[in-house]
Structure formats: C-alpha cells, structure tokens
Image: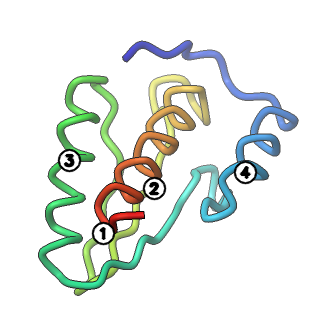
C-alpha cells in the first residue's frame, strides 16, 4: 500500500469520520477501540493489523486491554493526518469485520 503524505483537509477528515463512525479525531490522531468476543480474537486481529502496517511501513499505536484493542494513527513524518492513516484505519475496520464474522 502506498499513500500520499499530504495532510488531510478538514473536509477530507470529516468525510472519513462520517463514513467510519467508530473512529474519533482526538489529540491530532484518529483513534478507535474495537471490542472482541474473546481475548485471543483481539490478539489475532492485532497480528493481522501488524502485518498490514508492516507492509505499508506505517505503524499504529496499539493498546490491548483484555477484549478491547485501541488503535491510534497519525503520520508523524508528515506532521499530522494523511491518507496513510485513513487507509490503514479503513483496512483495520475490514479486518475487524472479518475477525468477528460479520
């Protein structure tokens, strides 16, 4: 995956957030907490996100708390949010849907 490192406009960010209601814009990052039916389901999700992130060379902050996994994204080298962040966030949403079988 390659993404443009141009900072998102406020309108582009709002469009993303509207289309991905689980994500919030907080502290200059986008953040979402996913809840899983079991601890190991969440761990498997983290592994899949890590594989995608590594291929994209774009790594989220990941916080694991029992059955909850929180991802936080920002493109540090661009100084804010870019399509790298929204692209990885959208992929995480897809992986979450697969993980919980919906």
**Residue drawn at x 47%, y 52% as measured from the top left:** 93
User: Badge 3 is on which residue?
Assistant: 48
Image coords of residue 90 (percent x, y):
51, 42
> Mark 2: few, some, or many residues within 10 Å (few <14, many ≥20)?
many
Q: Earlier in the sequence, mark 4 or mark 2?
A: 4
| Mark 2 secondary-structure assignment | strand
Classify residue 13 as left or right of residue 75.
Answer: right
Residue under label 1: 63
Residue 53, placed above or below residue 40: above
Q: In the shown orientation, is residue 10 left or right of residue 69?
A: right
- The quadrant of the rendering that contains the C terminus is bottom left
Residue 72's mark?
2
Q: Earlier in the sequence, mark 1 or mark 3?
A: 3
Q: Quadrant of residue 23?
A: bottom right
Query: How many angstroms separate mark 2 from mark 1 (CA)?
Result: 9 Å
Residue sitting at x 19%, y 71%: 41
Q: Earlier in the sequence, mark 3 or mark 4?
A: 4
SS type, badge 4: helix
User: How many angstroms separate mark 4 from mark 2 (CA)?
Assistant: 14 Å
> Is tag 2's residue or tag 3's residue first in the polypeptide sequence?
3
Measure the C-alpha gap from mark 4 to mark 1: 21 Å
Which numbered dot is residue 17? 4
- How far apart marks 2 and 3 lie (CA) works out to 16 Å
Q: Is residue 66 left or right of residue 61?
A: left
């Amino acid at each position: 995956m390659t993404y443009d490192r141009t900072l998102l406009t406020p309108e582009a960010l709002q469009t993303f957030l509207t289309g991905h209601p689980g994500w919030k814009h907080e502290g200059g990052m986008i953040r979402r907490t996913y809840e899983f039916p079991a601890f190991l389901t969440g761990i498997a999700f983290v592994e899949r996100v890590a594989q995608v992130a590594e291929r994209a060379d774009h790594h989220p902050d990941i916080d694991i708390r029992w059955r909850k996994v929180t991802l936080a994204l920002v493109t540090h080298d661009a100084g804010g949010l870019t399509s790298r962040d929204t692209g990885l966030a959208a992929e995480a949403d897809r992986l979450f849907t697969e993980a919980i079988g919906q």
